[in-house]
């Protein structure tokens, strides 16, 4: 029987509700659930368990003082005990008015040093947990109970070559010249200053070139409207050159004019680092109140606008955004189904475009958007394979 420690502190009782829900479900799944408030816990509790679920409230972006007291109590003894722990999985439940799971950073660093692996997204309740929040807590408890023992576990905070995951030296964004650059600097300069990276913003009026650079892997993020992005994926007209056709674009966030019918999307390539997107999205969400006043168009660059967009977007969700939405309890089965279906269609266009290029090369047809023969070849091939049009609603 797996022994899981549920270690927490709760001022208002909100975090306690979440921990108890997770612990009860773990018991139902056959695990031994050891529930301890931090004032009553000793260091051996952490040594003797096989997995841990931690719980705290968020107080000014920090964990509860009495939760932190447990770790302060033993000070440097923790690192002396590192060899006693082995590699163990852990996860969090957090009750927060604002700030999400930003309060977990310090303890995450310590847990990493002690060979623990954070393997499931944090379950976050905004103050008093709703029934949906408690469902997510119970799901977390069952997942931990049913997790098979392993020599190591996949880590949501993976190590880089130098240790823990780090922000890249530069974060590169390509966007519309003028107002697009203003918007990128409005949020990006603040992010770069806080996380210790350098923001590079490339101004590009030509949407074809923006997507071309993104396809080539030159930038982490690009911006585009729904119409521009759909035309690129379908390789229509100006987007049908060999190097400017479709690529596996994924939705990341919203950069929009307030009240816009068609928000400007922040996009990434499918292969853009998942944890870079996860951290970027988390920062944008947590700092919305700070950035919304830095540019008029950023007033709608928030989670609410994003969720509305995801209900009818033709774009798949980037894995990093999915991870974030799972962590805040907003990733639904409907989002999963639509994102998977969108990914199938986008990837199908990418594959079909390459197949048609191969056919054109064999017939010595120049793959250029200003070549009528190529446009006819590509149009006929799409009809031949019955690939659906992307509808912008």
Image: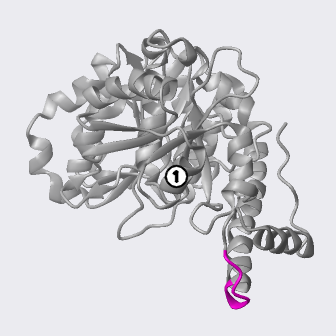
What SS does tag 1 mark?
helix
Residue placed most toward the observer, 250 or 12: 250
The prevailing secondary structure element of the residues shown in magenta is loop
| Residue 134 lies in the magenta-colored region | no
Counting from the top left corner in percent of width and height, residue 19 is at 51, 32
In front of the other: 162 or 240: 240
| Image quarter of residue 330 | top right
The residue located at (69%, 54%) in the rendering is 238
Image color mode: one colour
Residue 206 location (% of width, % of height):
56, 43
Q: In which quarter of the image is residue 45?
A: top left
Left or right of 142, for residue 49:
left
Check if residue 363 falls in the magenta segment. Answer: yes
Q: Residue at horizontal 62%, vertical 19%? A: 257
Q: State the image quarter where residue 267 is shown.
A: top right
> In the depicted view, which residue is nearer to us: 138 or 247?
247
Residue 9 in view of the camera? no
Q: Give the range drawn in magenta.
A: 361-366
Where does residue 160 sit, x and y in percent of width and height? 26, 57
Give percent across and percent down for residue 62.
Answer: 32, 20
Above or below: residue 250 compared with residue 385: above
Vertical side of 182 occupied by 242: above or below? below
Can you identify the residue that label 1 sits on?
A: 144
**Left or right for 99, reference 191:** right
């Amino acid at each position: 029987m797996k022994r899981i420690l549920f270690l927490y502190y709760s001022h208002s009782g909100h975090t306690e509700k979440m921990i108890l829900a997770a612990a009860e479900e773990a018991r139902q799944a056959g695990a031994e659930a050891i529930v301890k408030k931090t004032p009553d816990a000793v260091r051996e509790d952490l040594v003797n368990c096989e997995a841990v679920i931690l719980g705290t409230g968020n107080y000014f972006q920090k964990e509860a003082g009495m939760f932190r007291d447990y770790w302060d109590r033993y000070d440097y003894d923790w690192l002396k005990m590192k060899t006693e722990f082995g590699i163990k999985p852990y996860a969090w439940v957090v009750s927060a008015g604002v700030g999400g799971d930003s309060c977990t950073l310090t303890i995450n660093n310590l847990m990493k040093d002690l060979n623990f692996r954070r393997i499931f997204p944090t379950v976050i309740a905004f103050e008093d947990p709703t029934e949906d929040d408690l469902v997510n807590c119970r799901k977390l408890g069952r997942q931990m109970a049913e997790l098979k023992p392993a020599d190591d576990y996949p880590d949501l905070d993976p190590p880089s070559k130098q240790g823990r995951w780090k922000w890249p030296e530069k974060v590169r964004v390509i966007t519309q010249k003028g107002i697009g650059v203003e918007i990128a600097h409005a949020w990006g300069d603040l992010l770069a200053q806080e996380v210790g990276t350098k923001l590079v913003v490339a101004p590009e009026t030509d949407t074809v070139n923006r997507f071309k650079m993104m396809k080539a892997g030159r930038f982490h993020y690009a911006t585009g409207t729904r119409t521009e992005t759909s035309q690129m994926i379908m390789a229509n007209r100006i987007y049908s050159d060999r190097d400017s056709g479709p690529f596996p674009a994924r939705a990341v966030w919203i950069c929009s004019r307030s009240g816009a019918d068609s928000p400007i999307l922040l996009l990434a390539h499918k292969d853009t680092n998942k944890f870079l997107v996860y951290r970027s999205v988390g920062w944008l969400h947590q700092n919305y109140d700070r950035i919304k006043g830095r540019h008029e168009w950023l007033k709608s660059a928030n989670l609410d606008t994003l969720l509305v967009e995801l209900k009818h977007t033709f774009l798949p969700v980037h894995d990093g955004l999915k991870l974030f939405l799972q962590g805040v309890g907003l990733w639904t089965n409907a989002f999963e189904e639509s994102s998977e279906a969108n990914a199938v269609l986008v990837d199908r266009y990418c594959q079909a475009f390459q197949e048609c290029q191969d056919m054109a090369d064999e017939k010595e047809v120049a793959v250029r958007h200003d070549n009528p023969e190529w446009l006819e070849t590509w149009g006929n091939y799409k009809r031949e394979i019955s690939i659906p049009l992307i509808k912008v609603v």
